[in-house]
Amino acid sequence: VYNAAELAAGAAGTVTATITMPGDAVAGDILTYQVGTDSPVDIALTDVNIASGIAVEVDSLAVITASITDMAGNISTQVTATALDKDTGITDIAGTVIGITAGLTDATNSALNTDTITNDNTPDIAGITEPGSSVVITAADGKILGSGTADATTGAYSITLSPLADGVDIPLTVTATDAAGNTATAGPSVTIDTGVNSADVTETNDLTAGLTDATNSALKADIITNDNRPGIAGITEAGSSVVITDADDKILGTAIADADGAYSITLSDLADGTDIPLTVTATDVAGNIATATPKVTVDTTVAMPSITLDNDSGSSASDTITNDEALIFSAAAADVTRVYSIDGAAAATEYSAPTVDGEYTVTVTDTDTAGNVKTASTTFTLDTTLAIPTVGLTTDSGTLNDDVITNDAALSFSEAASDVNRTYSIDGAAATTEYSAPTVDGEYTVTVTDTDIAGNVKTASTTFTLDTTLAIPTVGLTTDSGTLNDDVITNDAALSFS
């Protein structure tokens, strides 16, 4: 059978046949040959063509006849030969030229079956060619990577390659050779990618994952956030598909890594919780998978602090006017940082109570480790001063002005301020809101007590002696001389006094 290469070597698709001379042929003999129905051709033999034969261009299956006539006119027996058939290409069973197809098998094309990327470094190359053909696959340097024989009926073949190093668009040459020696080639390329790779990642699985700075609400070095839809970001292989799932495999978010391998995903709502497990899975275009398992703590609440006066002293327990600057604060949780501020001044970690009378607003601010902030304030008036009242006798009657002995129990008091409640007590008796002067002679101690609305108390006292009585003196004649003892006619002016 003549193949395409042999036919191509001839003229107009013919092949070269050689007529060989018999051993008794001599120069001068006449060779007469006829190809098919062509006209007979006579050639005078020479020593050269006797030795090398006569080349004749023939079609496949052409019938060639030849005889020799010697110089005496004797004619040899005519011989006949038929040219071989031709096979000019890699064909299917029907004889249609099909060449060869070649590509990754679905089983080893680990990602999209429409691409040429695989994570199998010994992939299978399969296709269709002429049934029974031998198929050889070589690398760019000619190294044979695998070989096989196409199915005798269908022409299908599948060849597992020798191990290939990772690389992009690795060129392969797939050559089919049929029984006639015809060849057909295909030049597929494959990309071998056996891992999730990124030049910017040093981790063994080439995937990083953690809270974004924007949603890591407290320390950037921790995993605590007060955002229940935090962002998870990291680096992986460019173009990889990134999926984040929870412990129940519920998908919380997806993204495609950009050209630099960076990705950022805002998660679906998460309930508050500690060390919530996440699974971040990156799948590159070759189907390689890398995972990371970060945890996050979501904490969106902090208790509201409380702040109240320790002692709302004075006439009202709710007027926030006090003479006691002490405050009562609710206990701060262990993870809370608390600061105090008075009237908007710089915050301090300790409460320093004011000492000067005035109105104050004290604010307490609690911040937990997740960055949640709650504040509480109270406004109060500090009033620690009150004038001391005065009290004294209105009239210190008698011979001395300072002996506090008097026949008048009226007292003089300093004027009470408008916010002062004043009471009076005599000799420690129950206090009254009005001073009722004693009427019975004797020594008395009167105490006046002033109490302002802040609860400040000042007292003053005075002690005096009330003396409103005096014995009536008596006078009479010492001697009532004369005839009658009671006629007060006497000759002696002497008198007797009590």
Image (spheres, grey):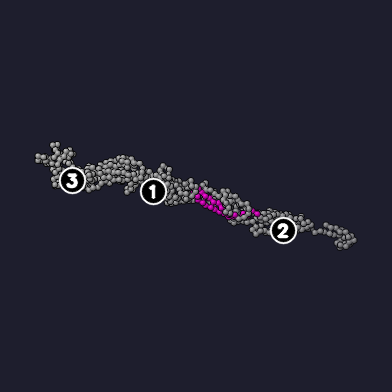
* In magenta segment, residue 83: no
Q: Which mark is residue 318?
A: none
Q: Nearer the viewer, residue 306 or 273?
A: 273
Amino acid bearing label 3: Asp
Instruction: Check disc 2 and report its element: helix, strand or loop.
Output: strand
Residue assigned mark 1: 239
What's the magenta region?
Answer: 360-385
Residue assigned mark 2: 411
Percent of width and height locating residue 294: 43, 45
The residue at 58%/56% (across/down) is 318
Residue assigned mark 3: 59
Mark 2 crowdedness (10 Å alpha carbons): few <14, some 14-19, many ≥20: some
Percent of width and height locating residue 194: 36, 43
- Disc 1 or 3, which lies upstream in sequence? 3
Asked if one can make out residue 474 in the rendered structure from this viewpoint, the answer is yes
Amino acid bearing label 1: Gly
Residue contact between numbered discs 2 and 3, judged by CB atoms under 8 Å: no
Q: Quadrant of residue 409?
A: bottom right
